[in-house]
Image: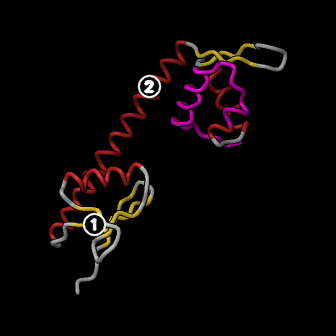
Amino acid sequence: MDIQPDPVRELTLLESIESDPDVSQASLAAQLGVAVGTVNWHIKRFVAKGYVKVKRAQRRKLRYIITPEGIAFRARLTINYIDQSMRLYRRTRLHVLELLAEVSKAEYSQVRLEGEGDIADICRLTCLEQNITLVNDGNVPILEVSGVKVRLHQPEKQ
């Protein structure tokens, strides 16, 4: 099994274990949308690094206890997650500002936004700030959100 450490998954696992020390690996796997073996790999890794201790609660039931080292590791993961999220926000916002400058230069004051999620929300807020109206139809530029990428599609001039 070739599993790579995933900071977001590790953070979610540690938060889940901290909130419910009696949580099962099957429940954690379902929550994360991964195989039980993946959760088992992460937990074994946590134990080996001293982040989690495993105690037998009942004959077939385990209890996971986060150690002080595990709490410190979770704090580092949280800080890194916030830092990466803010960097993504700033990069996306700057890119959308550049795209909206092109929209304004082409003498448009409206755009259509295609896509959903957090990146689309950043686009919406940036449009609002720049006095660019979002519309659902018309022959206007389109901001297309795909994953974390935003592209501008300009309409053909008549």
Q: Which amino acid does label 1 sit on?
A: Val
Q: Which segment did they paint magenta? A: 1-29
Task: Look at the image and tell me in which quarter the C terminus lies.
Answer: bottom left
Please name the residue that numbered disc 2 is placed on.
Answer: 76
In front of the other: 73 or 114: 114
The outermost residue toward the bottom is 158
Give residue 42's position: percent from left, percent from top.
64, 31
* 142 with respect to 72 (left or right): left
**Mark 2 surroundings: few (<14), some (14-19) or many (≥20) residues within 10 A:** some
* 154 with respect to 115 (left or right): left
- Does residue 78 lie above or below 152 as drawn? above
* Colour treatment of the image: secondary structure
Task: Look at the image and tell me in which quarter the N terminus lies.
Answer: top right
- Does residue 33 lie above or below 117 as drawn? above
Please name the residue that numbered disc 1 is placed on.
Answer: 111
Q: Is the magenta stretch mostly helix, strand or loop?
A: helix
In front of the other: 39 or 97: 97
* 106 with respect to 38 (left or right): left
In front of the other: 5 or 25: 25
**Mark 1 surroundings: few (<14), some (14-19) or many (≥20) residues within 10 A:** many
